[in-house]
Image (cartoon, helix red, strand yellow):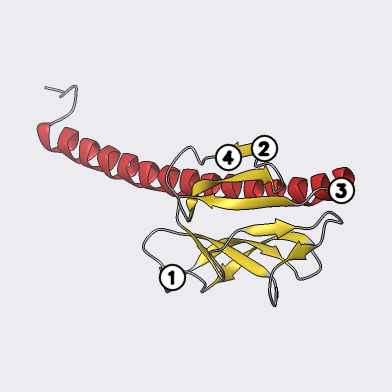
Amino acid sequence: MRQQGVTLIQMMCTLAVAGLLTHMGATAYHQMSEGLHQAAVARALAQSLREARNHAALRHRAVLVQPIDGLWGKGWRTTLEHNGQLLREQRPAKPVTIVGSDTRLVRFSARGAPLGAGFGGITLHICQRDTPYSVHRVVLSPSGRVSLRSDGSPGCAGR
């Protein structure tokens, strides 16, 4: 007599393989999602710094970009220095760790140049979870140029 269908052992093996593949796919999706979120935060931070510099130069007013509650990972506010008028506030959709070479605010003069005693530039690392590396960095040079760099850099070791 010819057998039709599958045995219990075949069914269990198939379910085990399907479960393993689903778990691997979910993990890969989560990692990809985290990477995309970190890249979006880095782009938003770089854009905010560029807009602040341009606003300062075009309106001939000093502009401040400061972390919310002293933590760049919570977000940042862009305000006019002379009256505190809020120009922009940005908060990440999900929590992210941002470590800066300097935690102070960023101040642009009325000509669009960064100000501060001995300002030598600031690097803000958007940190990966559970590693001392950041894939995305926002760099504000002493001249005021903002660049976004995407490479592995060990800037998150001291968080």
Q: Earlier in the sequence, mark 4 or mark 3?
A: 3
The three-letter amino acid code for the residue at tag 2 is Gln
Which SS class for mark 1? loop
Badge nearest the viewer, 1 or 2: 2
Gap between marks 1 and 2 measured at Cα: 37 Å
The three-letter amino acid code for the residue at tag 1 is Pro
Left or right, 156 with respect to 65, comes to left
Q: Which mark is residue 60?
A: 3
Which SS class for mark 3? loop
Gap between marks 2 and 4 measured at Cα: 15 Å
> Decide: marks 4, 3 in contact (CB < 8 A)?
no
Left or right, 151 with respect to 4, comes to right
**What residue do we see at 62% from left, 67% from top?**
123
User: Which residue position is annotated with label 4?
Assistant: 90
The location of residue 118, given as percent across then percent down, is 70, 77
The location of residue 88, given as percent across then percent down, is 65, 37
